[in-house]
Every structure is written in C-alpha cells, then in structure tokens.
Amino acid sequence: MSPLAVILTVSGYIAVLFLVAWLSGRRADNAGFFTGNRRTPWYMAALAMIGAAMSGVTFISVPGSVAADSFSYMQMVAGFTVGQLIVAFALVPLFYRLKVVSLYQYLDERFGIVSHRAGACFFILSKMLGAALRVYVVCAVMQLLVFGPYGWPFWANAVVTVALVWLYTQRGGVKSLIWTDTLKTLCLVGSLVLTIVFIARALDFGGTELIREVSASPMSQIFFFDNPASDRYFWKMFVGGIVVLVAMTGLDQDMMQCNLSCRTPRDAQRNIVLTAFCQIIVILLFLVLGVLLYLYVDSRGLALPAKSDQLFSLVAVDGGLPAIVGIVFVLGLISSTYSAAGSAMTALTTSFTVDLLDGPARYDEQRLTRVRHRVHLLMAACMTLVILGVGYLADDNAINLFFRIVSYTYGPILGLFLFGILSRRRPRDRWVPFVALAGPVLSALLQYAAAERWGYRIGFELLVYNALFVIAGLFLLSLGRRETEKS
C-alpha cells in the first residue's frame, strides 16, 4: 500500500469526521461540551461506547498478543462484564443523584476540596499518559506508512495528529463525541470484520474451516488455572478486569461523560449493559483475527516483525493481500485513534476547567467559554509532549504497558471512591494527597519485593493492592474524627 493511498484514506475519513463534528456541535454551549445537555438517546450512547471502549492500542496490540498470551485476555473481559454491571447499578444512580459535571465533585462533597483536586489531578495524569500511549502506537504505524517515506520527523507526525484532534473537538465536546464515536464504532467493527473475511479467503477458509482452525490452534486457549504465579492466571485476570473496568470506566471522566449524557439513569444503565455484551463479541473477534494473522504469516513464509504490535500492519499493508485490506486497516486504525484521543482531550478539558479552576462557579457563560478554549489548547500541547516522551518508554506490548500505567495511576482514584462509598468516615482532607501518592509507591515496592523474594509476579491485580494501600491510609487519617466533621 503506497503512502499516497494511506494519505487519501486518512484524508477521506478526517473530512467525514469534521463534517459530523461540525453538524453535531455547531450549536453546542458549555453544557453541551461538558455533558451533552443530558439529551443523548441511550441507544446512541451505546453505539458510541462500543467504539469508545476500543482504541488504537486495542486495534494494534490485541491481535498481536495471542502468540504470547493466547486468548487469556478473555478472562479479563469476563471481569470487565461484571465491572460494567457494578458501574451501571452502583455508580450511575449516585452520579445522577448528585448531578455532577465532573465525577470528582463527589470527593469534594464527601471529603473536601483538597481530596476533590487530588482525585482530579490523578485522573488528569492517568488520562494524559493513557491517551498519549494510545496515540503514540498509531503515530508509530503512520510514521512507517506515510511520514517516514516522505522524510517527516516523528515530532511533526505527533503535532499534526494532535492538532487535527484539537480542531474537531474544540467546539462540540461531548455533544460531538457521541456522534463521532458512533462513526468510529461503525468504522472499527466494519474494518475488523472485513479484514477477517479477506484473510479467511486468502487462507481458503470457509466459515466452518475458520472456526475449526482457530479452535484447534494452541493460541486459542482461554482459561489458565494451573499457575497462580503467572500473569495469565484466571482469578488474577478476572478480578483485575473487574477492578480495572470500575476504575477506568466508572471513575473515569472520559468514559462516564458519554454515559452521563443520557436523559435518565435508566437510559444510562441500558447503554452500559448493552455495551458490556457487545464488547465481549468485538474483543473475541480481535483475538480470532490474531490467530488468522499468525496462520497467514506462517502459510506465506513471511518474517514475523520484531514487535507483536506490528503484526497487523505488516500483514494488512505488506502481506500480499488485496489493497482493500490495507485501506480498511488504516480506516479502523485512524478512526479508533482520533475518537479515543478526542474523547480524552474533552474529558481532560472538562476536569481541568471544572475541578481545578472551578470554572462553572467562577465565570459567566462567555468567560467560561474563553477559559475552556484555552484549557483545551493547553491539553493538546501537553498531549503532544507526552506522546514524544512515551516514545522512549514504549518497549513492551502496548496493551500490557497501558494496563501497567493504569494500575499505578488509577489506584488512588479507586481507593478514594471506595472509601467514600463504603464507609462513613471522613479523613483529614489536607493530608489526603500524601496518601494518594503513597499508594502507587507502596504498590511498586510490593511488586518488586514479590518478584525478587518469592518469585511471584503481580499482574493486573496491582490496581487492587494500590487501592487497598490508599484505603488503609484514609482509614488512619480518619481515626479520632467524627463522621460528619470536615477539616
């Protein structure tokens, strides 16, 4: 696939994306940017959330991971499903009852302004790092396909990508993202299904043969109960999936902005439940695609790439398949990236404006709009810098690196919310940031000690230990204080 074909595909998608964003966001005010005016039909939110839960990391990394991890990711997806139900029936009613714009306003009411801002700061850090990693993965592919052949440096690649994301999200916010995420869902799922069809045809597989070959492959093993010390052990991944989903969706401003844009809590719950079951099917298809990619490489005698994240792009673009496969690959990759980065930038802008600047309370509508635009530009600049920094650290399978980041940065948020919801104690607010910082540090020390002294690898369940350290610290800060006392 030539660089020109890639450019034309990307340009066509971006043109459609900007048209959808303009049509949906041309009359958006600040309430439309932050909450979508809470008028989104639940089925539209569900379509948007199917795509919003996926990113370029999922698109690139999950298929390539099957050689090392088989279908073990489905164990985590089972945990995701349970986590979605917890979010739907425990957190959604709470947030609707409080009528929050930002989720972290709950921490202000429960503990105080310092806790509120500490939670928001950890979210901003988490989302910025996670979004930058997602965009970096795609920028790396685009560097190979387009920017490299034309002699453009990687920093120019990152600047162009983030600038386009900034342009299409600056006006409509959540009101636009519902529609652009729906477009992403259609493009991503469509490209996934079409790629499976074309590779199956190239391997001379009909429907029955495809199922038989994938099922017979050792890469299709789902459950791992044999070694509790392994990262793939079922209970570690299942429990980790529950906790990661609650933290990354239920306590994540990015994901919950779309859910809370529905008219009623009941609509939001319908949306989340439908999204949970659709997510199972979509991720299973990604894993099936991974097996087919390895079977295709083996049948054609192609050399495996140095990194598993490069497998999909190698086969789709340079694997001898029809040009349409490369086009749908680029379309799925670009749609997942721009949408994920756009929703992250919108959520970062919302959290910074509402949680750290207290914008809706301090400014009138006109001044708030100006402040929001400046913050939005600041978030774009920061994301570009972090993408360049991530390039020096992305030496691992991207999906694993992503969840390692999540385990450290979402732990304090999870601990704060769990302590607030499950207890009536009120810690000393001014000391909460120190406890929030101690959680990731103690988790890292525990992870190192477990590996060095006992040979036990702490995997995705690290987020649980992180949250427990924070909860223990909050309990100590609450000793000797009345339940209703504020500092």
Image (cartoon, helix red, strand yellow):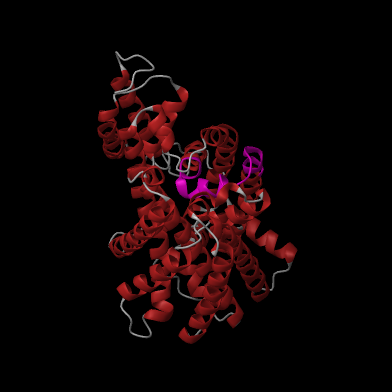
The answer to whether one can see residue 473 in this image is: yes
Q: Where residue 62 appears, x then y in whole percent?
A: 50, 58
Indicate the quadrant where residue 478 lies.
top left
* Residue 311, placed above or below residue 269: below
Horizontal relation, residue 347 to residue 434: left or right: right
Q: Quadrant of residue 140?
A: bottom left
Residue toward you, 374 or 332: 374
Q: Position of residue 50 (x, y in %)?
A: 60, 54
Residue 401 seen: no
Given residues 204 and 24, the one toward you in this image is: 24
Q: How many marks?
A: 0
Residue 37 highlighted magenta (yes or no): no
The quadrant of the image that shows the C terminus is: top left
Query: Could you tell me residue 191's position as x and y percent?
Result: 61, 68
222 is higher (above) or lower (below) than 393: above
Residue 459: which quarter of the image?
top left
Of residue 117 and residue 232, the one placed in the foreground of this image is 117
Relative vertical location of residue 92 with respect to residue 221 in this rendering, above or below: above
Residue 259 magenta-highlighted: yes
Q: Name above or below for residue 285 compared with residue 74.
A: below
Q: Which residue is located at x 48 percent, y 86 percent?
A: 4
The secondary structure making up most of the magenta span is helix
Is 101 in front, or is 392? 101
Range of the magenta residues? 248-270
Give percent across and percent down for residue 152. Answer: 33, 81
Name the side, left or right, on which 469 lies relative to 272: left
